[in-house]
Image (tube, rainbow, N blue to C red):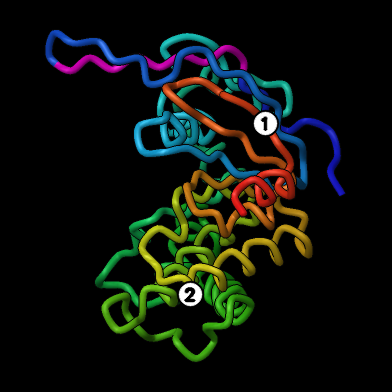
Amino acid sequence: MTHGKIIEVESVKKLYRLGEEEVWALKGVSLDIHRGEFISIMGPSGSGKSTLFNQIGALDIPTEGKVTYEGNSIFDMPEEKQAAFRCRKIGYIFQTFNLINVMTSLQNVMLPMTLLGVERREAENMAKSILERVGLGHRLSHRPQELSGGQQQRVAIARSLANKPEVILADEPTGNLDTRTGQEIVDLLKQLNREEGVTVICSTHDPKMLKSSERVHWMRDGLLERTTTGDQALSHAQ
C-alpha cells in the first residue's frame, strides 16, 4: 500500500561538458514518488536513468529544476544537512557493491552506524541482526573477496539498511549477477519493501524488476518517455 508523495522531481535538467561539447543527460524530467512504492527507472545505456537516480539520491546537483523530499528542496540545504540527509534517509545499493575490501561483512554494515555515532556494541548487534535478515548470519567475519557476487550484494543491501532509511536507491542491483542470483536479489528487495515499508527505487534495464514494480518509468534520450504499471511493462516485454 502506498501513501503520500515522499519525493518530487520537478523539471530537472543535467548538463555535462565534455571539452567543448555540451551533453544534456536530462532534458526536463518530472515525476512523483510515493511513500512505500517499489518503482523502476528503465532504459537503455545512455538514456539518463542513472543520472536521474543520482539527482534523486542527492549524489549530484541538477543544472536546472529541483528535487524535494517531503516538501523540502534537497539542494537548498546546507552541505552538512545534505550529508546528514543522505546518511539518515537514503540507503544506497550499487551495481559494483562498493564494499570495503579490508573490512568483514559485519564491519561493512556497521560503518554507516559508526558515522552517525552509534556506540560500537549497539552497532555490532544491529549489524548482526540485519545480516541475518538478508541470509548472511553465517558470513559475518568474511571479507568481500571471500564471498560470491550475490553474497556481496546482500552485504550491500544490509549496509543500505543500517540507519533504517526511508528510501533505498538501487542502481543496477542485478547488473553483475547471474539470472538466478539476480532474481534472489529482486525478491529480497521486494520483501523488504513489503515487510519494512521502505520505498525502493531501482535504476535498471533488467526485465526481472518489472514483475515487482508498481510503476515503471521509461527513459530515453534524457526524457521520461512514458510511465506504466509493472504488469503492463511485463506484458509488453513478453
Residue 199 vertical placement versus 191 (above, below): above
Residue 107 located left or right of residue 226: left
In front: 38, or 147?
38
Whole-percent x and y of residue 6? 73, 33
Does the residue at mark 1 contact the one at mark 2 (Cβ under 8 Å)? no
Tag 1 residue: 227
Whole-percent x and y of residue 143? 32, 79
Number of callouts: 2
User: Residue at 61% of width from left, 22% of height from top?
Assistant: 9
Q: Give the range drawn in magenta.
A: 10-18
In front: 8, or 108?
8
Residue type at mark 2 is Thr
Whole-percent x and y of residue 222? 44, 21
Q: Which mark is residue 58?
A: none
Look at the image and say whether residue 149 sits in the magenta stretch. Answer: no
Residue 138 vertical placement versus 132 (above, below): below
Whole-percent x and y of residue 124? 52, 75
Disc 2 element: helix
Residue type at mark 1 is Thr
* Comes first in the chain, label 1 or label 2: 2
In front: 33, or 206?
206
Tag 2 residue: 181
**Crowding at mark 2 (Cα within 10 Å: few <14, some 14-19, many 20+):** some
